[in-house]
């Protein structure tokens, strides 16, 4: 139907007749001549309909925004003063010979260059994706995925599909369920990840596996979660953690170079979980920000300020400071707002000292707490953090995890507000995660990664004896404050797997019912193995330079898990439910 | 953990020390020496443990089938008389220095070279896939998919993921449903295909799309269906049917060459639906079989055999013959069995004439019907089919479709039984399908492809006036009797789409509820577009030389839609169902 793409017509084609298909991006009448900018996925070309071509002119007069057109015409140079050097088609235009309306367009619900709300964009996704910027983002994602696949296909990885209709998985989030028609009262679950299947594939001798895998979690959607999301899922047999890490680090480096032309660090820095929490208050620190948390317990152990002395003398407590250079320009209102902000992360309050002039001693400080601190404490703190005129120092005191969490969140917020986030890409590895976290509510351990992650110790009795302080063989790849990949070496011995289930309070019966096939499989010569999974939606969004993963998902769902275009979910006729042996039970009105 | 793969150790490594990981395929004690065949995905290598290496010997003595081992040793040439030229490792063996048991194996439920039932294979899939033949089949599928992707990635196709949690789709089979937790009483459906999403992507300006897409149908499983299956789904904007067909024909040719080294015909033959039904009694004819149906109504119109004369004189009837050379060797029992066989395809009976000796006239014929036929009829039939001594001629008489169907099925069955299926690959296109089939039970038209397939006529009133005989722009690719791909040019004008819905008895309200978003999207300058979908499971099975698609699916389900390994589907705790606002209603015992 066409000889060229609109966006690729350039001066090399001058004098030639071209056949183009696309959409009317604009129509302008100017000096008795009609200009139609014709757009396809490659770009926009200017076409000109002159009045002496009566047939074409008549059609052109009927053209409205987004009419779908087929145009045959001759390429000619634009007059000099109309030349646009910024686009490939900017030196030429197409003098229209014939113009055919392939399909008319009704008046649009919004113009393509409008800044419309997301609901309208999702409802009319077929118009939204026509925007050149959305085209760019969607195609960036495609390039990311095809580059990853090519990398893995040429390195012996087998792209293997695992089931979508499967058994309830153990990732801990809620499962989406599918009633079985053939087996009344039974349900499939959609996978939260292919975790167990990929481990089984290693036990099945597939050696190296990957899949661009759809995963499902029925969670209350936070800003940037989706009910279904995509991960690059990988697994290797006969490896240790450095084998996996080195391989995927090289892969990510090559992919960033190929897809966005970015050279990442030759070696990604490594932080232990403990160091990341200590210095950044986060297990996914954004290293583009040069602010760090500093422990100041030593300086305040004996001061009179109980808010500090309690945690400072408690082995499970933390008193930490975050020095923000230039923070003295923050207003009292802004400082108060930060106090409210950190409450969302569990803080009871936020202490701070503003250093208006370091040389003036106490006179030069503004602070709600400095009056409670002795001279020594203030000096001790200032020495530890390297305080200077113009700083604000924020303080957190309380349980170690809580303080780290809220100061870590504050670090991100303040850095963004003050423009202290550097340009560029800062990848790193976070390693040496604790094997377990103690859940005080449930009074038992929970797995920090998942229950199939191997501990660093090989010996079952070692693990049992030191469960609380045991370290796992898990690792996360972090980029600019996002956990883009997470993985581990897995347990490959049945007695270790049973022991970990045990420590997690998963009884023998439950383990058998949920993971019996895994425990069985481990008995028959399971190889050592490990892997990782990368969040494709997030990496694509980072590469495309957008905050929202919804911009790199063709048909995303809203925060209430609806597809506004197709209107899913929706009601279903009663007979269909009867076949599935279920009945709807609406919640009672409160 | 290893320096080489087991199956790749060969004479170029003689004298070198290698580190190998894999499974103990066999252990043999011979002349005081232990031989362990170590297997990985690349193949098997013979290792030798000599008694003077006491530590290794002790470990080797403990090794049983499928122990997972790490072996370090030196490659040496085998004694001449032990050389095996058929495998890469056949000239060498590895003299073991150290041997480490990475994981022991309990006694196996079956031996890997056993011919066990499919239930056991599926339950212990991790053992089943370790078999070299399953490794080969699974890797064949991977190669097929990666070759297809590479072909499309380099030709401007965008690999775009469409939702799995979506709205009930209109392919006609039963949907799998997923209750929504957030929207009580509402359900998602799993897609039967990404049909509407790919059309929307064309309207969204993505130009060329593909996806290796998971699809779901909750059907009663026939021998070779799966609840979830995989198709290569493709769509092109601004194309006619020949554009799509020529492109994918070249793709399939290249893929067969790359993956299995097969050169398919330079141009695939084309048959209309009418010709395929007439000559082969099938819209997916197996052209490896040289038997054809021949219409013989002209010869029997005036004979005395009512079974023939009725259909022969009815415009909706058919009297056809299938001549089978060499069929005279079939026994009476076999002929009777064919009579029973065709009843499954709607035949009331199966008439036949066996030509023991053509020169002997009626004396030389055996047949239950020849006595009802006059001399002229028999001669007329024999002339039309080209009868010869040694033939059997089968007859079908009745409604056109029924006769074609059962003689088409008989053609396949007889050809297989008599070894008349030629070696090799016979692809073809079937085109010019009827737009509609009349469903006599429902008293309305049904779509032969799907309701989005464009008719050959552009004009709405043309279609309405000639609905019963209208031809669609659909096409199927057929290979060795399998429909491996099916597609069409789609409707891109809203009025044509509404008209087709109308003819199919889909009322305005229903159309709006189910396909409102499509009708909306068609209003805003939808481009002409078309595409195709290929069955990946079937193509992989054909390439791997297996009858069963379950051999090229890692974790397939049984005929009752169960996963025997994970035991899905399964019961779900009541509170989980409450959250989803559904309750199980078990069917009443009869």
Image (cartoon, coloured by chain):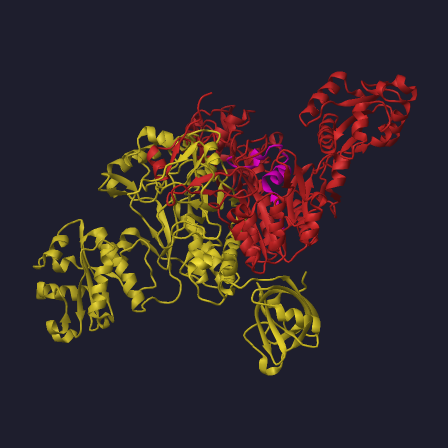
Chain colours: A yellow, B red
At 33% from the left and 40% from the top, the residue drawn is A587
Q: Is residue B533 magenta?
A: yes
Where is A60 relative to B148, above or below? Answer: below
At 55% from the left and 27% from the top, the residue drawn is B113
**Depth order, front residue of A17/A283:** A17
Where is A62 relative to B230, above or below? Answer: below
Do we see residue A499 in this rendering?
yes
At 67% from the left and 62% from the top, the residue drawn is A2
Residue A340, percent across and down? 22, 60
Residue B2, percent across and down? 46, 42
Q: Is residue B141 left or right of residue B359?
A: left
Residue A435, percent across and down? 30, 43
> Which portion, as a residue range, is magenta?
B531-555
**Depth order, front residue of A416/A379:** A416
Task: Please state the total of marks drawn on the protein image.
Answer: 0
Where is A131 relative to B76, above or below? Answer: below
Q: Is residue B83 magenta?
A: no
Do we see residue B9 in this rendering?
no
Where is A573 relative to B336, above or below? Answer: below
Determine the image quadrant of residue B483. Answer: top right
**Depth order, front residue of B546/B358:** B358
């Amino acid at each position: 139907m066409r000889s060229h793409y609109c966006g690729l017509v350039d001066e090399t084609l001058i004098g030639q007749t071209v056949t183009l298909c696309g959409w009317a991006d604009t129509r302008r009448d100017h000096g008795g001549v009609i200009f139609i900018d014709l757009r396809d996925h490659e770009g926009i070309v200017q076409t000109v309909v002159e009045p002496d071509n009566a047939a074409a002119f008549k059609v052109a007069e009927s053209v409205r925004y987004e009419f779908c057109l087929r145009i045959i015409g001759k390429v000619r140079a634009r007059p000099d003063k109309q030349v646009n050097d910024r686009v490939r088609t900017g030196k030429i235009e197409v003098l229209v010979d014939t113009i055919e309306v392939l399909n008319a367009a009704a008046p649009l619900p919004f113009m393509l260059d409008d800044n419309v709300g997301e609901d309208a964009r999702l409802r009319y996704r077929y118009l939204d994706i026509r925007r050149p910027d959305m085209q760019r983002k969607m195609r960036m994602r495609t390039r990311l995925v095809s580059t990853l696949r090519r990398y893995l296909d040429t390195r012996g990885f087998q792209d293997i599909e695992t089931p979508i209709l499967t058994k309830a998985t153990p990732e801990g989030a809620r499962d989406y369920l599918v009633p079985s028609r053939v087996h009344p009262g039974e349900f499939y679950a959609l996978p939260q990840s292919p975790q167990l299947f990929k481990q089984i594939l290693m036990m099945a001798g597939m050696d190296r596996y990957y899949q661009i895998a759809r995963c499902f979690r029925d969670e209350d959607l936070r800003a940037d979660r989706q009910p279904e999301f995509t991960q690059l899922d990988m697994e290797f047999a006969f490896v240790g953690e450095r084998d996996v890490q080195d391989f995927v680090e090289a892969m990510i480096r090559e992919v960033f170079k190929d897809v966005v032309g970015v050279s990442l660090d030759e070696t990604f820095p490594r932080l232990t979980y403990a160091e990341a929490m200590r210095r950044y208050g986060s297990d996914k620190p954004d290293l583009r920000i040069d602010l760090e948390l500093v422990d100041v317990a030593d300086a305040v152990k004996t001061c009179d300020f109980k808010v500090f002395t309690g945690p400072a003398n408690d082995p499970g407590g933390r008193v930490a400071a975050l020095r923000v250079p230039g923070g003295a320009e923050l207003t009292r209102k802004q400082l108060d707002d930060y106090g409210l902000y950190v409450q969302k992360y569990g803080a009871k309050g936020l202490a701070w000292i503003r250093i208006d002039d370091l040389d003036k001693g106490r006179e030069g400080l503004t602070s709600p707490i400095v009056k409670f601190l002795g001279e020594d404490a203030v000096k001790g703190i200032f020495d530890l953090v390297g305080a200077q005129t113009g700083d604000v120092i924020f303080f957190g005191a309380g349980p170690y995890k809580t303080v780290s969490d809220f100061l870590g969140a504050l670090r991100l917020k303040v850095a963004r507000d003050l423009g202290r986030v550097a340009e560029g890409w800062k990848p790193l590895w976070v390693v040496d995660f604790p094997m377990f976290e103690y859940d005080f509510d449930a009074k038992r351990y929970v797995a920090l990664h998942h229950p199939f992650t191997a501990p660093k110790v090989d010996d079952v009795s070692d693990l049992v004896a030191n469960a609380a302080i045991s370290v796992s063989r898990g690792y996360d790849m972090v980029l600019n404050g996002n956990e883009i990949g997470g993985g581990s070496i897995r347990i490959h011995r049945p007695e270790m797997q049973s022991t970990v289930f045990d420590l997690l309070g998963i009884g023998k019966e439950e383990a058998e019912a949920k993971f019996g096939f895994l425990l069985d499989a481990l008995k028959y010569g399971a190889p050592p193995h490990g892997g990782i999974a990368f969040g494709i939606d997030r990496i694509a969004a980072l590469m495309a330079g957008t905050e929202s993963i919804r911009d790199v998902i063709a048909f995303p769902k809203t925060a209430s898990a609806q597809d506004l275009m197709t209107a899913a979910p929706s009601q279903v006729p009663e007979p269909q439910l009867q076949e599935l042996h279920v009945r709807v039970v609406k919640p009672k009105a409160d």
